Image: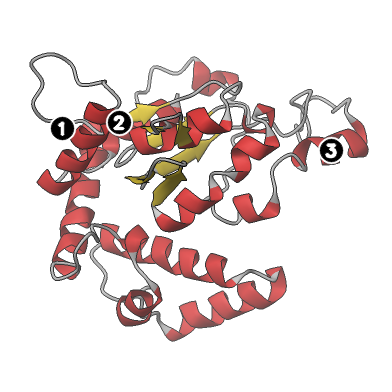
């Protein structure tokens, strides 16, 4: 449910993003009659039985796959460990480069594939590993085998890892409503406006997620306390250079949400 709400809080598409999305959906034959421009951000949720060609794209005359159809929007992979390992591994290039190159004997095509990846999985096959109320029946070996279906390099490319515990009864039965998507989206749009001003002279860069190493050094200035915390985390957790850059990008976005120039 949380993943399917993501498109309702994502920032509005710029004209350039809408044109790119429309081109991809036109090539795939998914443009509805009477639609001239795809303004809504796509949400794609392929089944775990999908092939690598279906995910990345392919065919005799290569058609865009799910990663390209999700360009500018959300690609949601539910039950992540149930996807075949070779299918998940092909995600690494588009997550890194924001595009997919498909080569055939007759032609070679490059489709854009800059998307937000959202994935969900159980903590173990039975679903109760770490649950305070029920005991897990999988054993350490079963849990380890289940989690090993997701490779370290792929996990390293996912910015946020969040545990979602069971919802208590008093929350389920409460009449209290959550924050509306419109209010969240207003904050997101404000943060995106700051980012567009920041990258106004950079072609193809719309958000902090698209920053390269030079941009990170220029725009991700941190306070002394924050730098000490970051250094301790990098050394203690043995984080990679990719993880270091992604932490700074996420921190830059959080600072944009509250209107701060420096990362605290």
Quadrant containing the N terminus is: top left
| Residue 232 vertical placement versus 159 (above, below) | below
The residue labelled by disc 3 is 145
Q: Hey, which quadrant is residue 5 in on the image?
A: top left
Element at label 2: loop
| Residue 160 vertical placement versus 18 (above, below) | below
The residue labelled by disc 1 is 39
Disc 3 crowd rating (10 Å Cα; few below 14, some 14-19, many 20+) is: few
Residue at 40% over, 82% down = 223
Residue at 35% over, 66% down = 252
Q: Are marks 3 and 1 in contact (CB under 8 Å)?
A: no
Quadrant containing the C terminus is: bottom left
Most distant residue in the front direction:
106
| Residue 189 vertical placement versus 200 (above, below) | above
**Image location of residue 44, percent across then percent down:** 40, 27
What is the number of the mark on residue 42?
2
Q: Nearer the viewer, residue 209 or 104?
A: 104
Q: Is residue 148 left or right of residue 181?
A: right
Q: Nearer the viewer, residue 247 or 241?
A: 241
Q: Hey, which quadrant is residue 220 in on the image?
A: bottom left
Q: Using the rendered image of the protein, determine whether residue 237 is visible from the camera's viewpoint.
A: yes
Of marks 2 and 3, which one's residue comes earlier in the chain? 2
């Amino acid at each position: 449910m949380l993943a399917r709400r993501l498109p309702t809080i994502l920032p509005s598409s710029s004209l350039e993003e809408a044109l790119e999305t429309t081109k991809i959906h036109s090539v795939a034959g998914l443009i509805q009659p009477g639609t001239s421009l795809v303004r809504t951000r796509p949400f794609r949720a392929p089944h775990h039985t999908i092939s690598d060609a279906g995910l990345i794209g392919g065919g005799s005359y290569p058609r865009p796959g799910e990663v390209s159809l999700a360009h500018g929007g959300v690609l949601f992979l539910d039950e992540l460990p149930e996807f075949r390992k070779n299918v998940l591994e092909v995600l690494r290039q588009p997550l890194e480069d924001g595009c997919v190159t498909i080569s055939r004997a007759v032609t070679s095509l490059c489709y854009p594939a800059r998307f937000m990846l959202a994935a969900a999985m159980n903590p173990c096959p039975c679903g109760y590993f770490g649950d305070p109320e029920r005991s897990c029946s999988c054993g350490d070996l079963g849990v380890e085998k289940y989690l090993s279906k997701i490779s370290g390099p792929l996990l390293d490319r996912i910015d946020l890892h969040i545990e979602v515990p069971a919802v208590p009864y008093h929350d389920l039965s409460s009449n209290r409503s959550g924050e509306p998507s419109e209010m969240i989206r207003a904050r997101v749009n404000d943060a995106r406006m700051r980012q567009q001003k920041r990258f106004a002279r950079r072609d193809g860069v719309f958000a902090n997620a698209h920053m390269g190493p030079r941009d990170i050094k220029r725009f991700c200035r941190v306070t002394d306390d924050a730098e000490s915390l970051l250094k301790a985390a990098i050394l203690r957790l043995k984080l990679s250079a990719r993880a270091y850059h992604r932490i700074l990008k996420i921190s830059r976005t959080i600072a944009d949400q509250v209107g701060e120039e420096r990362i605290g």
